[in-house]
Image (cartoon, helix red, strand yellow):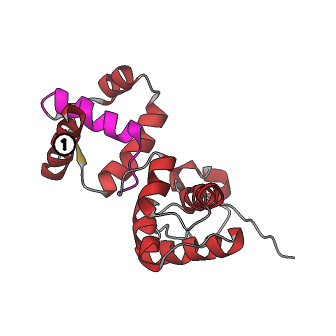
Amino acid sequence: HWLTIIGATTEPQKIIPPLADRFMIQPAFCEYSHDEMETILRRQAAVAQVVIEGAEFGLLARASAGTPRLAKRIILSARDLQVIHQRPPTAAEVLDLCGLDPDGLTVEHLQYLGVLDSRQGQAGLKTLCTTLRMNESSVTQLERLLEKLRLVTFTDRGRILTPNGIKKARELRAQAAA
């Protein structure tokens, strides 16, 4: 007898221990590479009959943040733009419609960086939750990409902006002032 379980998650810690303990092999969870995300985007574009110029796939793959679910949302947005404008959309147009920056950061990610920047680059989880008006689960979900992009790091004193994070936060402040 065989048992097949199919599931998808970007958060291995959410797999309940009784399920994980049933198997002799504990698989390693790996992030999708840039090339893999580009392949996923190309396949989804073909299925959705979306025309995207070659170089634009690379930009969209970067913004998908290694998440196929986000890649699908990007392609569906590209399809909508293609229908509206009757031409292949640019990556910039698609990302604007999706509310993403070129690194895949959302408005909430940018607000998170702004909160840390306004607190001299450091804050605890509870402070971030209160200031952003989000629960801990939502904030820690945001942190996954911020940490992956090396914009924040975690210490005993809380979350701290890295030099890259400080640079990004300052760029955001300059854009807001312009």
In the rendering, at what x and y percent does residue 93 appear?
46, 55
Q: Position of residue 18 (x, y in %)?
A: 66, 52
- Looking at the rendered structure, the secondary structure element under dot 1 is strand
- Of 18 and 162, nearer the camera is 162
For disc 1, the neighbor class at 10 Å (few under 14, some 14 to 19, many from 20) is many
- Residue 108 magenta-drawn? yes
Is 45 left or right of 58, judged from the image as shown? right
Residue underneath mark 1? 161
Residue at 45%, 26% (x, y): give it.
Answer: 134
Q: Position of residue 32 (x, y in %)?
A: 47, 70
Instruction: Find residue 39 and report its image quarter.
Output: bottom right
The boundaries of the magenta stretch are 103-120
Q: Quadrant of residue 103?
A: bottom left
Q: Residue at x 15, y 44 (%)?
A: 166
Instruction: Name the side, left or right, on which 153 lies relative to 79.
Output: left
Majority SS type along the magenta span? helix
Left or right side of 6 for 20: left
Residue 55 image position (x, y, % from top left): 41, 76
